[in-house]
Amino acid sequence: MLGVCTPDMQFVYVLPGWEGSVADGRVLRDAISRRHGLKVPHGCYYLVDARYTNCEGFLAPFRGQRYHLNEWRQGYQPSTPKEFFNMKHASARNVIERCFGLLKLRWGILRSPSFYPVRVHNRIIIACFLLHNFIRTYMSLDPIEEELGEGLPSNVIDDNEPNIINIHPSDAWATWRMELANQMFDEWQASRN
């Protein structure tokens, strides 16, 4: 299953129906190739975890560097641009983890194996995601969400922009990520002095 959310914890794309053992890149390729699939305008990107390819539209952390938030909570300070980038990436990407955590807290049917036919199961999943978005939109105070913390501001994507249609790593994208990491690290170090 593939789920994409905004910083304010609203799901903007859900693709159920894939087995858990399928490679994440294969699911992502399917999502962007569908007629009404995931749209990523050129110049925009989604944060993805290290199991995905770092390529245009999908910004992955650096491999072989500290990444998980619990590694940073013990007072360790990043010493390289890649470590700093990964710390910020993990913090921002944590929104999707909170979204899935909230879904599982709210909808018990998502916490256990399903014995429904795949078509019915997929519809149940989509219904849970739609209800999640409805609650996030119209319920001013959500006691379940208070256990996880508050959402962040929303981003708006223009549907009329051309979208990314391939998932291929490129030197240009890798260079841009490294330049971004260096800039973030330099700004962080300057703010500490």
Image (cartoon, rainbow, N blue to C red):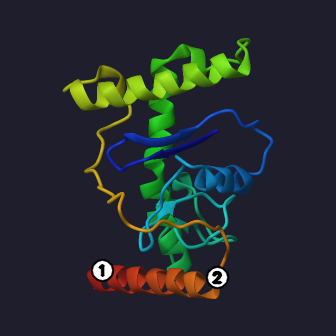
Q: Relative to 164, is 82 above or below?
A: below
Dots 2 and 1: beta carbons under 8 Å?
A: no
Q: Which amino acid, by three-letter code, is at mark 2?
A: Ser
Residue at (27% x, 81% y) in the render: 191
Q: Nearer the viewer, residue 37 or 95?
A: 37
Residue at (71% x, 57% y) in the render: 25
Residue at (77% x, 51% y) in the render: 23
Residue 73 visible in rendering? no
Q: Relative to 84, is 52 above or below?
A: above
Residue matched to label 2: 170
Q: Which amino acid, by three-letter code, is at mark 1?
A: Arg
Q: Nearer the viewer, residue 90 or 126?
A: 126
Numbered disc 1: secondary structure: helix
Q: Position of residue 137 (x, y in %)?
A: 26, 31
Q: Position of residue 163 (x, y in %)?
A: 48, 65
Residue at (42% x, 27% y) in the render: 130
Label disc, if present, on residue 81 of the rendered structure: none
- Looking at marks 2 and 1 on the same chain, the residue that comes earlier in the sequence is marked by 2
Q: Position of residue 38 (x, y in %)?
A: 52, 51
- Neighbor class of circle 1 (other Cα within 10 Å; few <14, some 14-19, many 20+) is few
Residue matched to label 1: 192
